């Protein structure tokens, strides 16, 4: 059974700029919550359909290797990655970008299936509430802060 989690954030940057930031997996280190340590990122600097990326992570004291592949790339509109190796039976992450009055709205849509059969299905709403909710609130706050810093003029 696939469970869906969605969360959106308003950003004071264009969809083009937000897309460009998110298409580089190396930028995860800028927006990862404090509970998630990014130990290593092996990836190209831009998303290309079919290209893989590997993340070595530490969360809750556990080291994890995550191997993802870019499933869809629509310039300035959409990035979709799926996991080939992760703690989940199935994982698809869509980054959806729309213009808005403030600059852009970015929506993260996660489709996932927990491991462990019936127990996993029972735990899915708990994972969504206790892990994904706080994680994406932190990611969105960090993304908002990143683009707020990027807009400030530099002094010479």
Image (cartoon, helix red, strand yellow):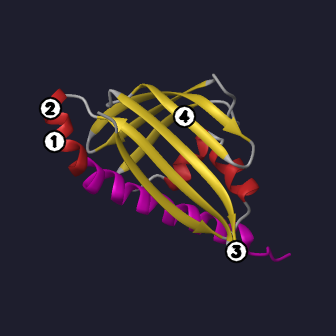
Q: Are marks 1 and 2 in contact (CB under 8 Å)?
A: yes
Label 4 to label 1: alpha-carbon separation: 25 Å
The residue wearing badge 3 is 101
Query: In the rendered view, would you say 17 is above or below 102?
Result: above
Number of numbered discs present? 4
Magenta residues span 127-156
State which quadrant residue 44 falls in. Answer: top right
Where residue 77 appears, x then y in whole percent? 69, 48
In the shown orientation, is residue 84 left or right of residue 123? right
The tag earlier along the polypeptide, 3 or 1, is 3
Q: Which residue is pictured at 60% across the width and 30% down the height?
A: 70
Q: Is residue 142 magenta?
A: yes
Q: Residue at x 79, y 75 (%)?
A: 153
Badges 3 and 2: C-beta atoms under 8 Å apart? no
| Residue 96 colored in magenta in the image | no
What is the secondary structure assignment of the residue under circle 3?
loop
Q: Residues within 10 Å of mark 2 (few under 14, many from 20)?
A: few
- The kind of secondary structure element at disc 4 is strand
| Quadrant in the picture for residue 61 | top left
Q: Which residue is mark 1?
A: 122
The residue identified by callout 2 is 118
Give residue 126's position: percent from left, percent from top: 21, 50
Mark 3 or mark 2: which comes first in sequence?
Answer: 3
Residue topped by disc 4 = 81
- Position of 63 relative to 23 (above/below): above
Q: Residue at x 16, y 41 (%)?
A: 122
Q: Is residue 71 above or below residue 137?
A: above
How far, Cα to Cα, is label 3 from label 4? 27 Å
Discs 4/1, front: 1
Mark found first going from the N terminus, 4 or 1: 4
Determine the main secondary structure of the stretch shown in magenta. helix
């Amino acid at each position: 059974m696939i469970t869906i989690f969605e969360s959106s954030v308003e950003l004071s940057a264009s969809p083009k700029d937000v897309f460009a930031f998110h298409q580089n997996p190396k930028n995860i280190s800028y927006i990862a919550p404090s509970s998630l340590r990014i130990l290593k990122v092996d990836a190209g600097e831009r998303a290309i359909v079919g290209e893989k990326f590997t993340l070595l992570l530490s969360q809750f004291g556990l080291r994890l290797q995550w191997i993802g592949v870019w499933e869809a790339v629509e310039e300035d509109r959409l990035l979709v990655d799926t996991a080939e190796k992760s703690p989940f039976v199935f994982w698809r992450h869509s980054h959806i970008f729309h213009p808005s009055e403030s600059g852009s709205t970015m929506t993260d849509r996660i489709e996932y299936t927990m491991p462990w059969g019936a127990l996993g299905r029972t735990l899915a709403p708990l994972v969504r509430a206790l892990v994904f909710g706080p994680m994406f609130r932190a990611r969105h706050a960090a993304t908002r802060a990143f683009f707020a810093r990027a807009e400030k003029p530099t002094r010479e």
